[in-house]
Amino acid sequence: MSSPPLVLITGANGFVGYVVLVGTLKAGYHVRAVVRRQDAINVILKGPSVQEYLHNRALTFAIVPDNTKPGSYCEAAKDCVYIIHVASPLVTQAGDLVSQLNAGNKATLEAAEATPSFKRVIFAASTANIRPFERIFQEHPANQAVILGRDDEVPALTAKTKVLTQPLLSDDAPPFHRYVNSKIAVANLVHEYGTSPRSESAHFSIVNIMPGWILGPEELAQSKQEAMKGSNLILGWPFFETVHLDDVVESIVKALDIDKVPGRYRNFLLCSHTPTGPVLMDAADIVRKELPQEVADGKIPFVGKLGTIKNKFDATPTERDLLGHSFRSFDQQVKDTVKCYVHLKD
């Protein structure tokens, strides 16, 4: 009896990476999780959802301290059939994010080229890959039109939208500006590769999974501070379109199935309530409705104010062609995120 296919997952100790790891194991694959340090392995090994997979070697590990070095993933990728590249700098990370992201994605493609057993590379990307840089500002005319209910005047951004790479921003530019710029740059790097003659002759295909801001419970977080290190911190920021963590994991795992998701180069956009997204100021009312006891106990301080920058996306092809169902609602996203957060220690 042959062993299940082996999937290499980078960034496996992160907010998204860990849940992708669990979802991949649950789907019957074996996983080699890539992390930077031994202490990250120790954290994963304590996760409740991985315990049943430790006895049969379904989960193994590889340490890659620096994925910006050429060929950094090649050794870890040996004998793997798929790679899911989740590792990515956070919004708040310092330094040249364009170079960091590009180097990590190049290392992923190098590993795929060097590993004959590879069938597919999946990049965990972002809606920021396809949003024009100027559309991150609320005063942009297209954003204002959507906010004012004139969204019929604005073309929807789709999984096929391409955006020009912006000039490199300085290290002291606002963190979110540098983050968006890096996402646009790395999307263009992958697109150039995926549509090139080099890719046509490759032994593997490429899928980009492009979610909005990801909301959901974080199993590995031991405190409120830890839970706010991932994209859940967005509940304290002005933010854009959102998607439930479970929809992201389900999309990535389903994209591993080449027979059901064929093609040499595919892009899938993930965001709920398209085309114009949820009413984000509804989050407070959702919490009051869905978590009345936690509200009564004073565990949820209703302070501050959520801002909204409206864009227009069309993610219905993902619901139809990949998920097979509608995205989980904003109500569910808020409920699951906040319920997990309030029960963590301060």
Image (spheres, rainbow, N blue to C red):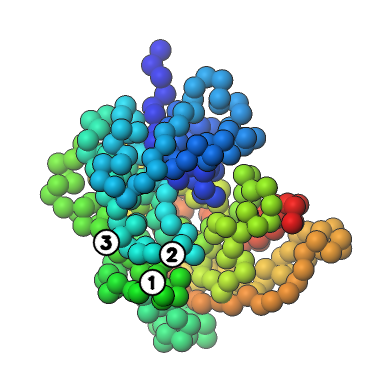
Q: Secondary structure at mark 3?
A: helix
Residue at 41% x, 87% y is 141
Question: What is the quadrant of the N terminus in the image?
Answer: top left
Left or right, 290 with respect to 29, comes to right
Task: Please tell me how crowded label 1 is: few (under 14), some (14-19), or many (20+) other residues with Cα within 10 Å.
Answer: few
Towards the viewer: 52 or 222 = 222
Among numbered discs 1 and 3, the one appearing first in the sequence = 1
Contact check, label 2 and label 1, Cβ < 8 Å: yes
Q: Residue furthest right?
A: 296
Q: Helix or strand or loop: what does disc 1 sit on?
A: loop
Judging by the rendered image, the residue that carries numbered circle 1 is: 171
Instruction: Give the mark nearest the N terminus, 2 or 3.
Output: 2
Which disc is residue 214 wearing? none
Q: Is residue 25 above or below residue 55?
A: below
Residue labelled with disc 3: 188
260 with respect to 18 (left or right): left
Disc 2 to disc 3: CB gap under 8 Å: no
- How much space separates mark 2 and mark 3, taking CA atoms? 22 Å
At x 27%, y 70%, the residue is 165
Residue 68 rendering spot, x and y as whole percentages: 32, 50
Q: Amino acid at mark 3?
A: Asn
Give the quadrant of the C terminus.
bottom right
Q: CA distance from mark 2 to mark 1?
A: 7 Å
- Identify which residue is drawn at 59% across, 77% down: 307
Question: CA–CA distance between discs 1 and 3?
Answer: 21 Å
Look at the picture and state if 10 lies above or below 97. above
Q: Residue lying farthest left?
A: 197
Q: Which residue is mark 2?
A: 94
Q: Amino acid at mark 2?
A: Ala
Depth check, front residue: 263 or 37: 37
SS at mark 2 in the image: loop
